[in-house]
Amino acid sequence: MQKFIEMTGKTEDAAIAAALEKLGLSREEVSVEVLELAKPGFLGIGGTLAKVRVSYEGPDEELVEEPVVQEAPKAAPAEQEAPKAEDTAPAEAPAAPEKSAAAPADDDVSAKIVDFLTGLLSRLEVNAQAQVSVDGEGNYLVELVGEGLGAIIGRRGETLDAIQQLTGYAVNRGQQKRVRVRIDAEGYRAKREESLERMALRVADKVVRYRRNMTLEPMNAYERHVVHTALQGKPDISTYSVGVEPNRRTVVAYTPGENR
């Protein structure tokens, strides 16, 4: 049965982390609604804590059921930033990892990728090698192979994203024709995409059940695109994004009659 707790913290992430620690659950096992955003105040004075509601499935005897809220469909509030094209339109979103077959790469670009990553990983004291291939679209796919690569993946893949961005800058510097470089380690990106899709469907079911919008944790543009895509065509559901990077969030909204 559905249960929830409310928790505060200096930031939204801190409040979520405190709730997860108290519940003994992982982020994938809960859904989060941000009730109040943190406000730092002036010189640390007058600020307010972030407040979140964390929903999860619990046993019947400890049930604290979330109330069903009968609300009319709401558009994005006026004070919130309107949805951006890269969030809602697949054509504008960052390209997903290509599913087409890839062949090992042995050209100047792949050599530059390997040289840059070898130097970077050496400075980071990470024992890993870069295996480069090229897919049918000409994108360079890099798999970092080694042991204990969790440190270069980072929280929600943030470190891996940074390494990917730096590699792209190094490879494309001074070049007229830009190439896309995608870097993965330990199959993280495919696992993360599957996790996001499952989470999006679970949250959408709760939004319809309780007839109230839910706001997800901050995600990068590609991860928001995964959520939007997973929920396209789902009855009574629409999605949009609010906020600014790096704290831009996806809202899963209850919109009766949508996609029917």
Image (cartoon, rainbow, N blue to C red):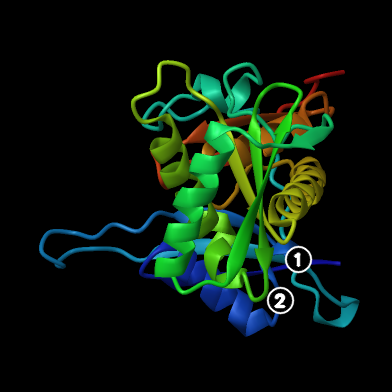
Q: Amino acid at mark 2?
A: Leu
Q: Amino acid at mark 1?
A: Glu
Picture quarter containing residue 14?
A: bottom left
Give the side of residue 247 with respect to residue 239, left or right.
Answer: left
On the question of residue 243 being in view, the answer is no
The image position of residue 225, as x and y in percent, is 64, 33
Picture quarter containing residue 1?
A: bottom right
**Residue contact between numbered discs 2 and 1, judged by CB atoms under 8 Å:** yes
Relative to 219, is 24 above or below? below
CA neighbours of label 2 inside 10 A, class few (<14), some (14 to 19), many (20+) = few
Relative to 111, is 77 above or below? above
Along the viewing direction, whichever of 92 and 242 lies nearer the viewer: 92
**Count of picture labels:** 2
Give the side of residue 6 with respect to residue 40, left or right.
Answer: right
Helix, strand or loop status at disc 1: helix
> Farthest residue toward the left?
43
Along the viewing direction, whichever of 184 and 243 lies nearer the viewer: 184
Disc on res. 25:
2
Along the viewing direction, whichever of 179 and 213 lies nearer the viewer: 179
On the question of residue 16 being in view, the answer is yes
Give the residue at mark 1: 29
The residue lying at 89 percent from left, 76 percent from top is: 60
The residue lying at 71 percent from left, 27 percent from top is: 255
CA neighbours of label 1 inside 10 A, class few (<14), some (14 to 19), many (20+) = few
The residue lying at 75 percent from left, 66 percent from top is: 29
The image position of residue 91, as x and y in percent, is 63, 16
Disc on res. 145:
none
Q: CA distance from mark 2 to mark 1?
A: 6 Å
Picture quarter containing residue 37?
A: bottom left
The image position of residue 154, as x and y in percent, is 54, 65
